[in-house]
Amino acid sequence: MVKASKGLRRRSRYILRKSPRARGNPPVARVIRKFEIGEKVNIRIEPGELSGAPHLRFQGRAGVIIGTQGRAYRVSVMDGGKEKIILSNAVHLLKAE
């Protein structure tokens, strides 16, 4: 019997899947995008970029930018009635409308 994987991206085959025409590296404009403090964002993990990705449980969540830490953004997200602060690079964030 094979031992089950315990990695961070386990059981994410369908959650992090891209459409065939969207595969490959993200455009440079998404990598160098800037956000302002207080701006609302949606978390959309870019599977082609591993660095600075938040945990899989935050995929699809909405949050507010509360600051920066290096080149990453600090995002406040509500998770189970508690406020959690996560770090994420700009490529994994989309501006909320």
Image: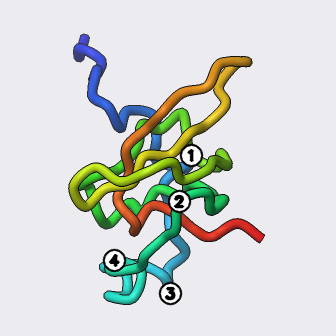
Q: Amino acid at mark 2?
A: Ile
Per the image, the residue denoted by label 1 is 59
Q: Earlier in the sequence, mark 3 or mark 2?
A: 3
Looking at the picture, tell me which residue is in the foreground, 66 or 54: 66
Residue depicted at x 26% and y 55%? 50
Looking at the picture, tell me which residue is in the foreground, 78 or 6: 78
Residue depicted at x 32% and y 31%? 8
Q: Amino acid at mark 4?
A: Val
Residue depicted at x 32% and y 66%? 48
- Image spot of residue 44 (x, y percent): 54, 58
Q: Amino acid at mark 1?
A: Gln
Image quarter (top left, top right, bottom left or bottom right) of the N terminus: top left
The Cα atoms of the two marked residues, 2 and 4, are separated by 18 Å
Give the colour scheme shown. rainbow
Height in image: 24 above or below 11? below
- Image spot of residue 96 (x, y percent): 70, 66
The Cα atoms of the two marked residues, 1 and 4, are separated by 18 Å
Q: Earlier in the sequence, mark 2 or mark 4?
A: 4
Judged left or right of residue 63, residue 21 is: left
Per the image, the residue denoted by label 2 is 37
Per the image, the residue denoted by label 4 is 31
Q: Amino acid at mark 3?
A: Arg
Q: Earlier in the sequence, mark 4 or mark 3?
A: 3
Q: Earlier in the sequence, mark 3 or mark 1?
A: 3
The Cα atoms of the two marked residues, 3 and 2, are separated by 33 Å
Q: Nearer the viewer, mark 1 or mark 4?
A: 4
Identify the disc placed on residue 21: 3
What is the secondary structure assignment of the residue under circle 4? helix
What is the secondary structure assignment of the residue under circle 2? loop
- Image spot of residue 29 (x, y percent): 39, 88
